[in-house]
Amino acid sequence: MKFKGTAHKVGEHIDTDAIIPARFLVTTDPVKLGENCMAGLEPDWVKRVAKGDIMVAGRNFGCGSSREHAPIAILGAGMGVVIAHSFARIFYRNSFNMGLLLIEIGDDVDKLRDGDILEVDAKAGTIRDVTSGVEISYPPLPDTMAALLSKGGLVPYVKERLGVKQD
């Protein structure tokens, strides 16, 4: 799994209500949720994002309520990966279940700058900041998690494993 895109930095302790405010939870449509991604932090934030871009966050990203809509909104905004210092536990699991890759790199997150071009190789466990030349290593994604993500999340993964026809 490889990604390349512009880094969009957000702060620390960003909760799920900032990622996708409750007023937008009337749908699970990724496109509609993506249109309002990070609206609780800054209205129209998502208008700066292009498909393939990468969110970079501080500590405890995704804290707050356990809403699956938050990772769906990030995916719907066109971002397939979030790099952060650390993640809230429930958000971490929900994200993988929904098909969103999360990469936790601790204090190394401070080496990444807003607007820089990043290359991520999840299998190798590397992040390369093309703009600054910084390279960060982290434990590679386990094969089981990579398989889950490659299918688009837990439900499609289980359906395939059980031989259930996909919708």
Image (spheres, rainbow, N blue to C red):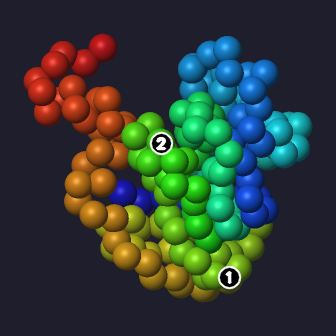
Residue occupying the far right of the picture: 43
Above or below: residue 164 compared with residue 40: above
Would residue 7 appear left or right of 83 to someone viewing this image? right
- Which quadrant: the N terminus? bottom left
Viewer-proximal residue among 92 and 79 = 92
Q: Earlier in the sequence, mark 2 or mark 1?
A: 2
Residue occupying the far left of the picture: 163
> Residue at point 57% right, 26% down?
30
Mark 2 touching mark 1, by CB under 8 A? Answer: no
Residue 85 percent location from the top left of the image: 62, 71
Residue 22 percent location from the top left of the image: 75, 26
- Which quadrant: the C terminus? top left
> Residue at point 63% right, 82% down?
107
Density class for disc 2 (Cα within 10 Å; few <14, some 14-19, many ≥20) is many
Mark 1 residue type: Lys
> Residue at point 29% right, 30% down?
156
> Residue at point 54% right, 75% down?
105
Density class for disc 1 (Cα within 10 Å; few <14, some 14-19, many ≥20) is few
Residue 94 - label? 2
Q: Nearer the viewer, mark 2 or mark 1?
A: 2
